[in-house]
Image (spheres, grey):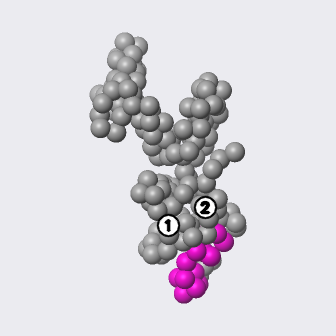
Amino acid sequence: VTAMMTARDIPGERLAHVGHALVKDFKLDAKGNAGGSDAAPMRVAEIMNAMQKDASETLMKKVRESIDPKKLAALESRLFRFDDLVLLEAGARTLVVDGLPSDLLVRALRGADGDLKEAVLSSISQRARKMIESELSGGGQDTPAAIEDARKSIAQLAMKLASEGRIALPKRD
């Protein structure tokens, strides 16, 4: 951990220990018992959902080449990004975005494509929509990191609602 935090080279045997610990950790079930079949996809999805989109997509290409379709489906069913809001049913999307602070929505929508903006804005009240559209048209000072953080927090909310059974995540092809 010290080597990772100080950006020094990490000796191979230390990396092997970390790898073994991760494998052991990923094989835990929700109660911390070894051998849980659902734990690995859930934890890997949590990591991939927290990654930047480009890095996550690159990793997913490699994963698709190397794991069996059943495990791949289990992983993909737990992946959700801000861009996936357009894939949600209208009621589910409304449940996710309605009531979020407008500054969070503005930040998340900066630089988003038109379809995504429309999907999100059509899921909130007309008053909130007009205010957000006004702020978006006025430009902004949000950093790419702040935009990414806003998008991740909204995606995490969608994942939380899905885990509670309040919404259904979209099926992936």
**Residue at figure coordinates x 57%, y 70% from the top left:** 91
Q: Is residue 156 above or below residue 53?
A: below
Which residues lie in the magenta part? 118-131
The residue nearer to you, when weighing 5 against 43, is 43
Residue at 38%, 26% in the rendered image: 35
Q: Residue furthest bottom?
A: 127
Locate residue 80 relative to residue 35 in the image: left or right.
Answer: right
Residue 141 can be seen, yes or no: no
Residue 16 x %, y %: 39, 16
Q: Is residue 16 magenta?
A: no
| Quadrant containing the C terminus in the rendered view | top right
Q: Position of residue 62 (x, y in %)?
A: 62, 29
- Residue, disc 2: 88
Per the rendering, the mark at residue 63 is none
Which amino acid, by three-letter code, is at mark 2? Leu
Q: What secondary structure is found at the residue carrying circle 1?
A: helix
**Mark 2 closeness class: few <14, some 14–19, many ≥20 residues within 10 Å:** some
Is residue 64 visible in the rendered image? The answer is: yes
Q: CA distance from mark 2 to mark 1?
A: 10 Å
Q: Is 120 a magenta residue? A: yes
Q: Residues within 10 Å of mark 1 (few under 14, many from 20)?
A: many
Q: Which residue is mark 1?
A: 96
Residue at point 37% right, 12% down? 13
User: Which residue is nearer to you in this view: 105 or 26?
Assistant: 26
Residues at circles 2 and 1 in contact by the CB criterion of under 8 Å:
yes
- How many discs mark residues in the rendered view? 2
Q: 16 above or below 155?
A: above
Q: Quadrant of the N terminus?
A: top left
Label 2 or label 1, whichever comes before in sequence order: 2
The residue type indicated by label 1 comes to Val
Classified by dominant secondary structure, the portion drawn in magenta counts as: helix
